[in-house]
Amino acid sequence: MEALTEKNTNQTPSKPPKNMSPWAIARRKFVRNKLAMTSSVFLLIVMIASFLAPYITTVDISRVNLGQMSLPPSSEHWLGTDKSGRDVFVRLLYGGRVSLLVGLACTFLIVVFGTIVGSIAGYFGGVVDSVLMRFTDFILNFPFLVFVIVLNAILFGHLSGVWVLIVVISVLGWGGVARLVRSKILSEKENEYILAAISIGCRPSKVIIKHLLPNVLSTIIVQATILFATMIVAESGLSYLGFGVPTEVPSWGNMLSTSRDPDVMQNMPWTWIPPAIVLTLTILSINFIGEGIKDALNPKSYR
Amino acid sequence: MLKYTLRRILGMIPMLFLISVVVFTLALAMPGDPFSGEIDPNNTDPEYIEEMREKLGLNDPLHIQYARWISNFVQGDFGESTRYKMEVSDLIAERLPNTVLLGATSLVITYILAFAMGMYAGRKPYTLGDHFIGGFNYFGLAIPSYIAGVFAIYIFSFQLGWIPFQGSVDITVEKGTLEYWLSRLHHVITPAIVLGLLNIASYTQFLRNDIIENSRKDFVRTARAKGTPEGKIYNRHILRNSIIPLITFLGFDIVNLVNGAIITEAIFTYPGIGQLFLNSVMNQDYPVLMTLTMMFSFLVLVGNLIADILYGVVDPRIRLD
């Protein structure tokens, strides 16, 4: 006992003079990670360029220009034009808008819904838990791609547009997050501070939001970055197959799907190589950022 | 263990029932009549259509329609394809071997490459070779399969002419000969690599990290102290421990193959069940669509079951109850 107290008092002065919050430590670790920082800058540039597309160019993207069909890259059209005479560079910017929007919106909806279901199931346990988890298992047992394609085919005639795809993907995609959050909440709620919070009369909603969620937030953030990449891949994969966003809306997947025409693939590589490269680099940078965040939030790693 | 397995298999029945209800509802909600393929589209006489609808039972209450569909389905009568005008079971039997070949080749390539690269990188971590493999892994994890597929076709098929870009076999070769099988292998190899790319990368990374972790454990020090050759330590002592977690991925492989086959077969216009599924959605070929959706769901259920059971088999500490 004595030795322990002595050890504690000895250790105090050796700590850094200013106590940093866990978030500040994480931020410092992340900023020092060169790969993650480069990726962040790249992703930021892609995002800003995409979302400001209407202000960067004034070209009408939907107009078919018969005079400028299938032109190779030149100083006038940086990346050439496609079979309908539309500028590939401009479409790339607008396509990024749609692809990133779908990715962000799906990630947001999935994380919010998955977290709500997972935290309620994990906190209350018992019957609530079994009912919610059976439902989650039910959703997880659907082959994701198959059902997104079928649902999209049903809704296609009635409702169209990007939001249909976002809702369909989100409805079928939240199971994994719910399971993850539940398992984290289950182990976290065994701690004494939760018992203390309940014993002083905190309502369940307050215990979950104020006490439990902040402690599982790091897991959720890491999961969200993985989801963001997965959802962008899902959107462009579906659009490539012709079951994603409507074909008249430019998205990276729709631009890639022009390569299904052997003539376009062989003779007009400038129309599909740029979206392929931008898409791959975006996914790569999101993966690096995710790894950087995971590393930064892990108190055991010293980098 | 046996009790758990049996209970899980029994637990699949209500899940399959729910999925069949969902599939039936979705088919009803799709544009057009799910069972109207029997009606001659050229005859627009309303009386004829009404008569046929009555005869086909489309005017019956929904639960009766469902009961009829599911009882036929369970007995193996999946109906007739409205597009190909043949029994769905025959149609699937014709396409399934292609997909099975694709999936099996993909699994074999995945495991061979993942083991070779993972064992090398795990044995010599932080060397040039390890960094090279690590770079490949980051790339493999980031590049979506359809982009890899498109580039593979562009480079190896159109520029170099090494591989065919569509089909499952050269139509000029005679069936059953060695040439026939070589041609099939030639057609399947690139789609199989593209299909397995993500798994190759993630399994390699997993095996590498596990080998590095295991090589610091006490049993390795003991083996070294006894004078066991380094090769034997890595290939026998460590590998045996590192394979265990990898085995549990087998169940998830089935799930991945179901999703991956649809995209890969579309890129390479490979005539398997993934392509059949996409065509059935596009042509509103409901009997095929419903059967394949049920089949894919069943495979995913089985895949998840295998994954859960293997967890228990390889790690007795996980209590399954």
Image: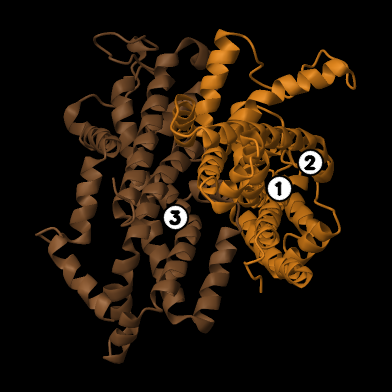
In this picture the colour scheme is by chain
Task: Examine the rendered structure and indicate whether residue B178 appears above or below residue B216.
Answer: above
Q: Is residue B255 at all visible to an observer of this figure? A: no
Whether labels 2 and 1 belong to a single chain: the reply is: yes
Badge 2 marks a residue whose secondary structure is helix
In the picture, the quarter occupied by the N terminus of chain A is: bottom left
Residue A164 x %, y %: 43, 50
Q: Which residue is mark 3?
A: A170
Residue B180 x %, y %: 83, 19
In the picture, the quarter occupied by the C terminus of chain A is: top left
**Mark 1 or mark 2, which is nearer the start of the sequence?**
2
Badge 3 marks a residue whose secondary structure is helix
| Mark 2 vs 1: CB contact within 8 A | yes
CA separation, marks 3 and 1?
23 Å
Colour in which chain B is drawn: orange
The residue carrying pointer 3 sits among few (fewer than 14), some (14 to 19) or many (20 or more) residues within 10 Å by Cα, namely many
Chain label for disc 1: B
Chain label for disc 3: A
Residue B67 x %, y %: 77, 67
| Residue at point 32%, 34% (across, down) | A96
| Residue at point 12%, 64% (across, down) | A13
Q: Is residue B43 left or right of residue B161?
A: right
Of B227 and A158, the residue lying toward us: B227
Residue B92, numbered label: 2
The residue carrying pointer 1 sits among few (fewer than 14), some (14 to 19) or many (20 or more) residues within 10 Å by Cα, namely many
Q: Which residue is mark 1?
A: B292
> Residue A66 lies in what quarter of the image?
top left
